[in-house]
Amino acid sequence: MKRPYQLSLLAFMLLALSAFTFKTDQAPSLKERIIELSKKVEPKVIEWRHHIHENPELSNREFKTAAYITAHLKSLGIEVQEGVAKTGVVGILKGGKPGPIMGLRADMDGLPVKERVDLPWASKIIGEFQGTVVPVMHACGHDTHVAILMGVAEVLSQVKADLKGTIKFIFQPAEEGAPAGEEGGAYLMAKEGVLEGMDAIFGLHINAQTEVGQVKYRPEGIMAAVNSFEIKIKGKQTHGSTPWTGIDPIVTAAQIINNVQTIVSRSMPLTTQAAVVSFGKIEAGVRSNIIPEEATLVGTIRTLDADMRERLFERLRTIVKSTAESNEAEATLYIDKGYPITYNDPQLTAKMAGTFVDVMGAENVTPNMNAITGAEDFSFFQEKIPGLYFFIGGAPKGVDAEKQAPHHTPDFYVDDAGMLTGINLLSRMVVDYPEVTISKK
């Protein structure tokens, strides 16, 4: 016969055991489910990436890519808007709880580049660019961006009952720039109202010079504003043996090029931000013994500060005009609208800082990376609403990331293993954004 104290001890042990069992049997949290679902969808994301990489399309011509995305979103029961900004696709997922409207963006277009990477899924596609037949390649990683966002859509659609707010999956065409005479890209999407009612937007870019598993970002200006320019110089044609009987636009062009290079080195406050002026094309003449009537110069301007950009434009106009006049030539300068600075809203960036660390671990996060003089039309979204843009690693582990082929080149390559980072981060931003608050000092 058991004594009373033995019964009490037995009851206590049974109670403790049941409490332990109850605790370990608790349903996983939403964040834990995101991690598991991201891992589960990763093989599909890799498969989608290979298909998209093998079938690239140029800007404003992403018809098959759009159809591929649309079919996937519809299979998930997500509301789909097609033909946005020509070929764009927007998926709308309403969470089961009230909350903000959040945007997640991926760009879809490839580039007129011939692939040299030896892959079973390398591109052999031919397209047309500005009237010329060209090879087409995903030479900037947009194929991974699309596949990542398709994966995020699948993950979030499986937990929608627990999500706060509405998510817009924005698959954007023409990030590399619309064809001549056409509108496109983020500018046209914003113009058509994609951002209406949206509280914040998130975007990422895979990077071939950053190791897989690493993430980099910074508050404020992360990528430069870009403006293309064209200078047309008119002289007077003459025989090359008697240059004094004409006005030489080639000599004038050479002097303009040299003088323009003093703008950044002598007129810009470079301790504030970086700036770049580069010439990419010179066109003049037909043969050795004819001084032509005209010359054309084409170049690009990159700036990370709005005031510096205006000052640079002013100096460029003055130098072009004055240099031409000093040679008795005429010169006209055209500067296009370009893309604004890709500007990470400081409040939004601070709000999501914890998400980067929680998902990746502090040792894998660079929160104050150096700004990049490349440009991104995600900046048009950030002009309208708070936005956060960041970079994820695409260089295979164990290689010298800095020696990897640059973006926009035939040898560009990023590892499939980098995409899980993107799936995890974008999914968690949707979960964390409605929950996190920061003090406004």
Image (spheres, helix red, strand yellow):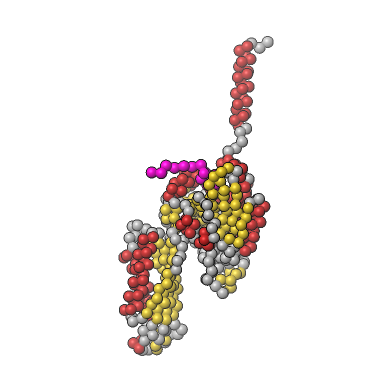
**Horizontal and vertical percent position of residue 179:** 54, 69
Which quadrant of the structure image shows residue 26?
Answer: top right
Residue at 60% in and 52% down: 92
Q: Of residues 233 and 307, which is closer to you in this image?
A: 307
Q: Where 58 sits versus 431, above or below?
A: below
Q: In the rendered image, which quarter contains the C terminus?
A: top left
Q: Is 429 one of the magenta-colored residues?
A: yes
Give residue 326's position: percent from left, percent from top.
31, 79
Q: Is residue 358 above or below residue 292?
A: above
Q: Is residue 162 left or right of residue 187?
A: right
Q: Of helix, strand and loop, which mostly describes the magenta segment?
A: loop
Can residue 438 be spotted in the picture?
yes
Give the vertical position of 17 relative to 278 (above or below).
above
Q: Residue at x 52, y 49 (%)?
A: 213
278 is within the stretch colored magenta: no
Which residues, given as a range, are shown in magenta? Answer: 427-441
Report how many numbered discs are placed on residues in the image: 0
Q: Nearer the viewer, residue 200 or 111?
A: 200
Residue 400, given in percent of the width and then of the height, sits at 49, 55
In x, y percent, where is residue 300?
43, 67
Q: Is residue 321 left or right of residue 415?
A: left
At horizontal 59% and vertical 45% (from top left) the residue drawn is: 95
Q: Quadrant location of residue 374?
A: bottom left
Tell me the quarter of the picture where residue 295 sits.
Answer: bottom left
Q: Residue 372 versus residue 414: which sits nearer the camera?
A: 372
Identify the residue shown where x is 46% and y is 61%: 375
Residue 398 seen in the figure: no
Image quadrant occupied by the N terminus = top right
